[in-house]
Image: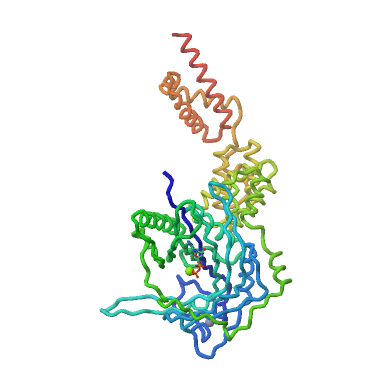
Amino acid sequence: MSSPYQPVVGLEVHAVLETRSKMFCDCPLVDSTHAEPNVAVCPVCSGMPGMLPVINQAAVEYAVRVALALNCQVHSTSIFARKSYFYPDLPKGFQISQYEQPLATDGWLEFDTAEGEQRVAIRRVHIEEDTGKLTHVEEDGGRYSLVDLNRSGVPLLEIVTEPQLHSVEAVRNCAYALRSILRYVGVNSGNLEKGLLRIEPNISIRPAGSTEFGTRVEVKNLNSFRSLERAVAYELERQGALLEGGGAVVQQTLGWDDARGMTQPQRSKEFAEDYRYFPEPDLPPLVLDPAWVEDVRASLPELPHTRLKRFAGQYGLSGYDAGVLTAEREVADFYEAAVAAAKQADAKLVANWVSGPLFGLLNEAGAELGALPFGPAELAALLDLLAGGAINPAGARLALAELFASGGQPAEIVERLGLQQVSDAGQLQAWAAETLARHPQQVAEYLGGNAPLLNWLFGQALKLSGGKADPAALRAELERQIADAGLQKEQSA
Ligand code: ADP
Ligand code: ZN
Ligand code: MG
């Protein structure tokens, strides 16, 4: 049954610009999950009176990289503005942000869904500073709030999309595509758990076919992509039931309770929604030299979605495989270097081994590609041995595991571990014959019509060979001997 309502979602995203120092002072950025509270604080970011902010040029460059990667118009002049509100995590009583004249506007982002390629418009991209962090504790019958200003003044990029996402899948894939771009251009690690990337969906529904917007809610507190998906799905469901029951959606900010799997009204920070924005008197307008902006544009890497399409065409990969291999820049680079180094292994084989066995080993070890004791050239050499028939897939897996554990040269590993594939006809005949002799019962059942037993028998034969037999040749030999046995049985019957 198709729903009578269309989902409408827009994203507001905050990404920490992971520069060395803060937005307006030279305090370092520290890992909030490890650092002691208030170790990276100075009079500027703790809001002492009379302190003057100084713009972090690296943060501006990071911001411009993202804005360009999102196909935005980067404005030669943007203005910092004060957003005033009172909250204990904000020592100055205002946050420096950009309001009427943001850094960049009018961009777009492409991503894939099951229905094909989609595009969401980017409304604006602006620079601001982060707030401090409050921790509420209850102790000895008293209640305290602790404030940590390590995060105060950390550079943030706010990215706002138009409300053009119309399914949970579109929301998820758009968010992944955005994360991938942030990582590609090297400004943000994309870590939701640590709050380095915060994705807040605005969600509404409207009768299918309608062009007017329904009332939206905004959901905060999403610490994972899983939560993002669950929260959007939950809200669509909740709003649908409300409207069906004759009720109305109330515009509000909600928090996601992951344990209970539901959204809940959040106590609003800013009950009076009057931020009294005005241009920040302590900072000049941010003026960018167009030539410098063009230099930044020229320095951008090929971006994930473009690279995905190129991979699919150039290497003959499925959209899915190309997506897996291009989601991370390091993976895509590794893959392309391996394909270039391979002499016999083709691009498809390399793709299968990177996204299959290699990813498997990395996941198992919780390791990063950068920490491998071998490079793309060694993977290529290994897959050349496979493609050339010197080893079989089982041998290649063992050799890869050894390479993964200790590095080295694939040819030497194959030699040392005795992984060479055996294609000798006499040897294959012997293994097949031995398999038949050991399992007469299964052979009889197979001949009696239990077809899946052939795979089992083949598995036994391969095992007998220590995994070293040329699998296709062994299978052919096994099938031949079983067919012979069948014939003999018929003749003797
Ligand atoms: P603000 O949060 O400052 O009021 P806007 O209302 O312009 O800003 O939009 C904030 C976000 O909400 C944007 O990502 C936008 O796409 C999204 N949005 C606006 N209207 C709707 C709607 N009716 N349904 C879903 N999302 C919406
Ligand atoms: Zn500081
Ligand atoms: Mg908002």
| Residue found 46% across the figure and 29% down from its top | 456
One can see residue 377 in this view:
no
In the rendered picture of this protein, how many numbered marks are placed on residues? 0
Vertical arrangement, residue 78 with respect to residue 398, above or below: below
| Residue found 48% across the figure and 60% down from its top | 213
Vertical arrangement, residue 371 with respect to residue 74, above or below: above
279 or 363, which is in the foreground? 279
149 or 70, which is in the foreground? 70
- Tell me the quadrant of the picture where the C terminus can be found: top left
Q: Quadrant of residue 270?
A: bottom left
Residue at the extreme left:
141
Residue 275, horizontal then vertical, whole percent: 48, 79
Coloring basis for residues: rainbow
Q: Is residue 86 left or right of residue 342?
A: left
| Residue found 53% across the figure and 35% down from its top | 467
Residue 356, horizontal then vertical, whole percent: 54, 45
Residue at the extreme bottom:
50
Residue 172, horizontal then vertical, whole percent: 50, 55
One can see residue 442 in this view:
yes
402 or 75, which is in the foreground? 75
Residue 293, horizontal then vertical, whole percent: 69, 70
Q: Is residue 98 left or right of residue 296?
A: left
Q: Quadrant of residue 286?
A: bottom right
Vertical arrangement, residue 166 with respect to residue 319, above or below: below
